[in-house]
Image: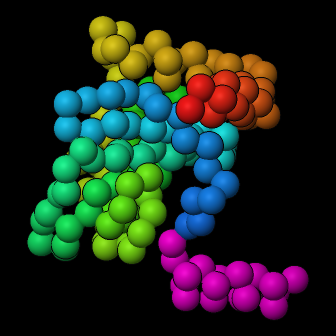
Amino acid sequence: MRNLLIILTFLLIVFPTISYAEFKWVKSRDMPISTEYEDWYNSRVMGKSITFWRMIDYKTLQSDDNGQYISSVFLQILDCADLSLTIQFIEDYSDSMGTGELVHINKLSKSEKEEVKKILEPGMSNYKNYYDTCSDTFVNGLGGTQDWWLELYEANSTKN
């Protein structure tokens, strides 16, 4: 068992990026400069929190000190105790939908995570969605949330 843990840790160090081939991206928001997608199918529960994936597909090439990219993939945590969102890390990619060359990984420090933590309030447009996700997940279990997301993903996939 210990050897397996060592091998898995080694693989994560050598290959730090996540394989997005199994992600179930569903469009969540269309903005003037980007389109946002979420994946709750690959979410996990940690205590009173739920991890989930968000991707931003930019309509034009983005550029910063780390390079040029057209899409960004985020691992986020929805804390159901205080209904807040926190980014854990961001990966920038050279092509759309989190594909192409990995341009940069930003693993946020504890202080950076606190800076970007967003408390959701009842007047916000996405408050009800996140509130309902917390309620449903902790009442019906994570499997129910993942099944619902898979149905949503499949319904959206047949439209394309």
Left-right relation of 121 to 132:
left
Label the magenta part by its dominant secondary structure. helix
Quick check: is 113 in the magenta stretch? no
- Residue depicted at 61% across the width and 50% down the height: 23
The relative height of residue 106 versus residue 51 in the rendered view (above or below) is: below
The relative height of residue 67 versus residue 153 in the rendered view (above or below) is: below
Residue 33 percent location from the top left of the image: 20, 38
Residue 84 lies in what quarter of the image? top left
Quadrant containing the N terminus is: bottom right
- Residue depicted at 20% across the width and 67% down the height: 68
- The magenta-colored residue range is 1-17
Residue 133 lies in what quarter of the image? top right
- 11 or 5: which is nearer to us? 11
- 92 or 58: which is nearer to us? 58
Q: Would residue 77 be seen by someone viewing this image from the given angle?
A: no
Residue 26 percent location from the top left of the image: 53, 34
Residue 138 percent location from the top left of the image: 70, 26
Left-right relation of 27 to 46:
left
Residue 156 percent location from the top left of the image: 60, 28
The relative height of residue 140 versus residue 4 in the rendered view (above or below) is: above
